[in-house]
Image (cartoon, rainbow, N blue to C red):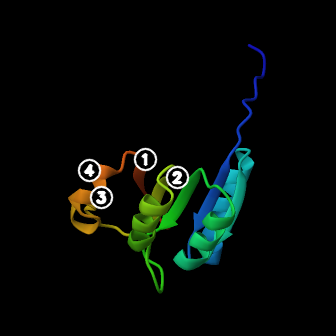
Amino acid sequence: MANMEQQVSGLVLVVDDDEGVRRVLSRWAADMGYTVQAAADADSALDIMREHPVDVALVDVRMPGHDGIWLIDQVGRLFPETAVVLATGLLEMDPMVTLGPALWATSSNRSIARISPR
């Protein structure tokens, strides 16, 4: 079978207050062929999204200032075409309690990924 590389395109926005996590997730998305922007907080992320159309936002849940829950609410209202993946190191998180059933009922492009700090 011939080596077939699939071309990918799109902008991934990595939002995390931890510089190491931002760097790792950014490199991971870039290695898959995506263009990557990174932000250390929710407000900076929204500034980037106002400047560039973002296809996927990888968002940490817990950040100083506005947290990831606040950010995904803003993204849902302002940029409904952007898919959001919540990335968290939290050991226990019930999305129906933390995010609320209304968010999940209206959001078809939302996902949660637990990142294990090994």
Instruction: Tell me which numbered mark, 2 or 4, is placed earlier along the sequence.
Output: 2
Furthest residue to the top?
1
Amino acid type at image mark 2: Thr
Residues at discs 3 and 4 in contact (Cβ within 8 Å): yes
What residue is disc 4 on? 105
Name the kind of residue labelled 1 in the image: Asn
Residue nearest the viewer, comparing 22 with 79: 79
Instruction: Write down the residue under mark 3.
Output: 103
Q: How far apart in space, not on screen, are marks 1 and 3 (Cα)? A: 11 Å
Question: Residue 6 appears at what percent x and percent y?
Answer: 72, 30
Assess whether mark 4 and mark 1 are in contact (beta carbons under 8 angstroms).
Answer: no
Query: Disc 3 marks which amino acid?
Result: Leu
Label 3: element kind = helix
Query: Residue at (47%, 55%) from the top-left corner?
Result: 85
Whole-angstrom CA distance, mark 3 to mark 4, is: 6 Å
Judge whether residue 118 can be spotted in this image: no
The part of the image, by quadrant, that contains residue 45 is bottom right
Residue of label 1: 109
Picture residue at 57% right of the left edge, 69% below the top? 15
Which is more N-terminal, label 3 or label 1?
Answer: 3
Density class for disc 2 (Cα within 10 Å; few <14, some 14-19, many ≥20) is: many
In screen coordinates, is 40 left or right of 68? right
Contact, mark 2 vs mark 1 (Cβ under 8 Å): yes
Q: CA distance from mark 2 to mark 1?
A: 8 Å
User: What is the quadrant of residue 97 in the picture?
Assistant: bottom left
Crowding at dot 1, Cα within 10 Å, few <14 / some 14-19 / many 20+, comes out as some
SS for tag 2?
Answer: loop
- Residue drawn 55% across the image and 78% down it: 43
Distance of label 2 from label 4 (alpha carbons): 16 Å
Label 4 sits on a secondary structure element that is helix
Residue placed under numbered mark 2 in the picture: 82
